[in-house]
Image: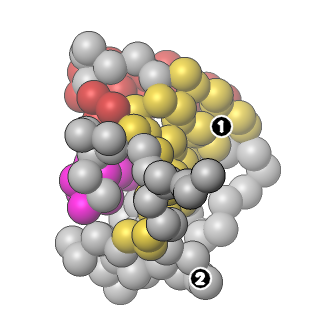
Amino acid sequence: MASTASPRREINAAAVAAPRGHFAHAVVARPFVFVSGLLAVDTNGSVGAPGEITAQTTHILDTLEAILAAAGSSPAQLIKLTVYVTGIEDRAAVSALRRKRWPDTRPASTLVEVSALAADGAVIEIDAVARQENA
């Protein structure tokens, strides 16, 4: 029996800083979109607002939306988010920003406190799994 699955496709959104390593912003394996861990980095690879959870989270959510759009998805299609923070006390702020941004989207979610992230000054990283809009 022949497979009807679409081939794996790498996504790198033009409006987003290039990945800092050997990975893509996201990989589409229809009907799913797997988004790599996102830090609040600018197009030069520098962390914006070092140590500031609200600004970094907002930047990451903007970036996530751009990557989802490039992959044929949207926040309404989010299935799972994993959030890594360097301070567990930031949980409430992150939750409030997500609730305000996507009031009708409640994906499965995990939040983990970590000792450090891959860039100096980064206090949050988010990765995601979504479904493509018309898959």
At a point 57% along the width and 76% down the height, the residue shown is 23
> Looking at the figure, which quarter contains the C terminus?
top left
Q: Which mark is residue 87?
A: 1
At a point 25% along the width and 39% down the height, the residue shown is 133
Q: Amino acid at mark 2?
A: Gly
At a point 44% along the width and 59% down the height, the residue shown is 6
Horizontal and vertical percent for residue 94? 45, 30
Q: Is residue 63 above or below residue 114?
A: below
Numbered disc total = 2
Q: Residue furthest front?
A: 1
**Closest to the observer: 77 or 116?**
77
Is 64 magenta? The answer is yes
Q: Amino acid at mark 1?
A: Gly
Whether the residues at callouts 2 and 1 have beta carbons within 8 Å, the answer is no
Question: Which residue is tagged 2?
Answer: 21
Distance between mark 2 and mark 1 Cα atoms: 25 Å
At a point 42% along the width and 44% down the height, the residue shown is 31
Q: Which mark is residue 29?
A: none
Horizontal and vertical percent for residue 111? 64, 30
120 left or right of 5?
right
Q: Secondary structure at mark 2?
A: loop
Boundaries of the magenta span:
60-70
Label the magenta part by its dominant secondary structure: helix
Task: Classify residue 116 by image quadrant.
Answer: bottom right
